[in-house]
Amino acid sequence: MIRLAVRVRREQAELALAELLELAPGGVEEVDVDADTVEYAVYGATGELPSLPALTAAAGPALVELTTTEVADDWVDRWRAFHRPLVLGDRLVVRPPWEPRRPAAAVDLVIEPGRAFGTGAHATTRLCLELLLELQPPARPGLPSPERPVVSGTTGLSSGPPTAIDLGCGSGVLAIAAARLGWRPVLALDLDPLAIEATLANASANGVAESVSTRRFDVRTEPVPAAPLVLANLLAPLLLRWCSQLPAAAGVPGPGVTAELPRRVIAGGLLVSEADAVAEAFAGAGLGEQDRRVRGEWAALSLAPGDLG
């Protein structure tokens, strides 16, 4: 088995990923190398992988390094050992399906990582989940208790406008957690079709298939739909792009402008060095910083209109 890895500059990673997925529609593995570099890798036998010239062209100016390595026969077992449960006290656990359930957790999520996505243990996802747990979901008559998964066969929960949006959903961790915590319905958005598939599968596995809807979405060109809560675990350039679409920043409503200001935004995917600039940009659009969490080199922000203080 061969592992073919492409390292790209972080600020251009999303664009490079979109091109790489055209060559590797089965998905890529994402690894944070350092503050400036992201690695995307594909696995396969000799002759099954994209050619090196094709990968070089796909990465374009973002390319830092391209490497190939042979992978040991036990790579699947070692890959599984890499994905450990995320435990946030007794309130929430996110675990891969091969890890046992933790009965003490109020919310127990099972996320199948595949090779394209993680299980939610990355620092950026953890910080977003911590901030999400601090929020009180809106009271909605007739909804099942947020401490229990929605049972199969429940109908009508995904109708109507979303209560929460997961912008750049990946494997759907934030969308599914929000639904389990009482934010229903949830709309999960991502450019990658594999993310849509993974989110739908994981929503079904966690009993919230009727509460989570999905569609492909490009934050660079489309206005974000209106919702009281937006969970945006994105890289800083994409967060700033969306911020420029908010009504106060855009100046006047029009094509490409978000319809209305969310009542709460949780913005992750930020390096600590980027957090102040992103917070300042959102403040200019009418969303002030209410809380900030930091873990290692990563940061996440909780933002709300000024009247929420």
Image: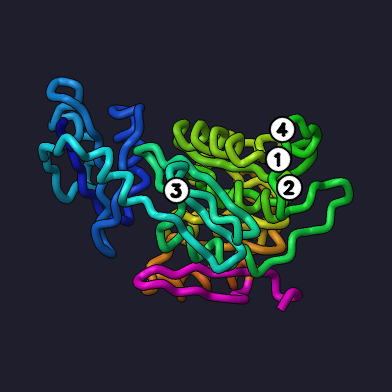
Are the residues at dot 1 and dot 4 in contact (C-beta closer than 8 Å)?
no
**Residue type, numbered disc 1:** Ser
Which mark, residue 93? Answer: none
Residue depicted at 41% across the width and 72% down the height: 295
Disc 1 crowd rating (10 Å Cα; few below 14, some 14-19, many 20+) is many
Would you name the residue on which mark 1 appears? Answer: 211
Front one among 75 and 274: 75
Is residue 260 in sight in this rendering?
no
> Circle 3 — which element?
loop
**Residue type, numbered disc 2:** Arg
**Residue type, numbered disc 3:** Glu
Quadrant placement of the C terminus: bottom right
Would you name the residue on which mark 3 appears? Answer: 99
> Circle 2 — which element?
loop
> Circle 1 — which element?
loop
What stretch of residues is rendered in magenta? 288-309
Which mark, residue 184? Answer: 2
Residue depicted at 52% across the width and 72% down the height: 279
First in sequence: mark 3 vs mark 4: 3
First in sequence: mark 1 vs mark 2: 2
Are the residues at dot 1 and dot 2 in contact (C-beta closer than 8 Å)?
yes
Closer mark to the observer between disc 1 and disc 4:
4
Q: CA distance from mark 4 to mark 2?
A: 15 Å
Residue 79 position within the rendered picture, expressed as x and y whole percent measured from the top left: 28, 44
Disc 4 crowd rating (10 Å Cα; few below 14, some 14-19, many 20+) is few
Q: CA distance from mark 1 to mark 2?
A: 6 Å
Would you name the residue on which mark 4 appears? Answer: 152
